[in-house]
Image (cartoon, grey):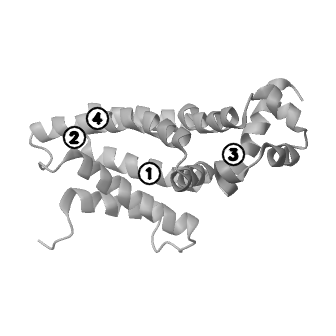
Amino acid sequence: MPAQDRRTQLLDIALNVFSQKGFNGATTKEIAAAAGVTEAVIFRHFPTKQALYQEVLESEIGCPRFQEWLVKAKDCMDRNDDEGLFQAIATAILESHRGDARLQRVLLFAALEGSEIALTHHRNFSIPIYELLRDYIVRRQRDGALAEYHPGAILSAIAGMAARYAVYTQLFGFTPEDSDEETIAAFTNILMNGIKAR
C-alpha cells in the first residue's frame, strides 16, 4: 500500500479504536491488528501513540464539511442573517453527530479521561470560532437587532439544544419525533422568540 494510503488507513482505524476505548484504553498493538499490520508500521508513520492521537484530532480542522460550514456562517454574518447563522450552527452540530460520531466520542472520552492533549487541541480549535461568533453577536446587539443577553449564553443556548438533541438521538438511540430540519427550525425559533405564549 502506498505510504499516504497506509497513513490514511491507520488514522481511520485509530479513530475507530480511540472512539471505542479512549486514549488510555486503546493500544497501538490493537490498532495495528485492526489494520492488519505490525506495530512497527504504525511507528514508521507516527513516532508515538500520542502523535497518532494528535493526528486523529487534527482531522477535525481539515474536514471539508467544517470548511464549507465556515464559509456559510461567514456569509450569514456578512448579510446580518441572525436566524440563518443560528440554524447553520445547529445544523453543523447535528451533522457532525449524524455523519461520523466517532470524533464526538473521542472528545467525550477525552473529557472523561482528563486528556489534556485532546482538551487543549479542542479549545485551540473552538475558541477562534467562538470569538468570531461572539463578536458577531456583540455587533448585532449594538445594532439593536439582538437582545442584550451575554453572547456566550446565546451561543450556548443554540449549541446546547443541538448537541443535547444529537446525543439523545445518535448516542442514546431515542427516535426523533420530527425531521432534523423541523427540529433545527424549532430550536432557532425558541432562541429568537422564546417559548412564552404572546
User: Residue 89: in sight, yes or no?
Assistant: yes
- Label 4: state its secondary structure: helix
**Amino acid identity at mark 4:** Met
Nearer to us of marks 1 and 2 is 2
Where does the image place residue 69, in percent across and percent down from the top left?
Answer: 45, 38
**Label at residue 15:** 3
What whole-number distance in Å separates the C-alpha atoms at marks 3 and 2? Answer: 35 Å
> Is 88 left, or right, of 103 in this rendering?
left
Residue that appears at 38% across and 47% down: 89
What whole-number distance in Å separates the C-alpha atoms at marks 4 and 3? Answer: 33 Å
20 up-or-down from 69: above or below: below
- Label 1: state its secondary structure: helix
Which badge, 3 or 2, is on the more N-terminal residue?
Answer: 3
What whole-number distance in Å separates the C-alpha atoms at marks 1 and 2? Answer: 18 Å
Return the residue nearer the eye: 65 or 155: 155
Return the residue nearer the eye: 193 or 6: 6
Which badge, 2 or 4, is on the more N-terminal residue?
Answer: 4
Residue that appears at 16% across and 71% down: 196
**Label at residue 77:** 4
Label 1, on which residue?
91
Neighbour tally class for label 3: few under 14, some 14-19, many 20 plus, Cα within 10 Å: many
Label 2, on which residue?
137
> Is 192 left, or right, of 112 in this rendering?
left
Where does the image place residue 187, in percent across and percent down from the top left?
Answer: 33, 61
Where does the image place residue 188, in percent across and percent down from the top left?
Answer: 30, 57
Residue that appears at 67% across and 32% down: 51
Nearer to us of marks 3 and 2 is 3
Which badge, 4 or 3, is on the more N-terminal residue?
Answer: 3
Q: Quadrant of residue 64?
A: top right
**Amino acid identity at mark 3:** Leu
What whole-number distance in Å separates the C-alpha atoms at marks 1 and 3? Answer: 23 Å
- Label 2: state its secondary structure: helix
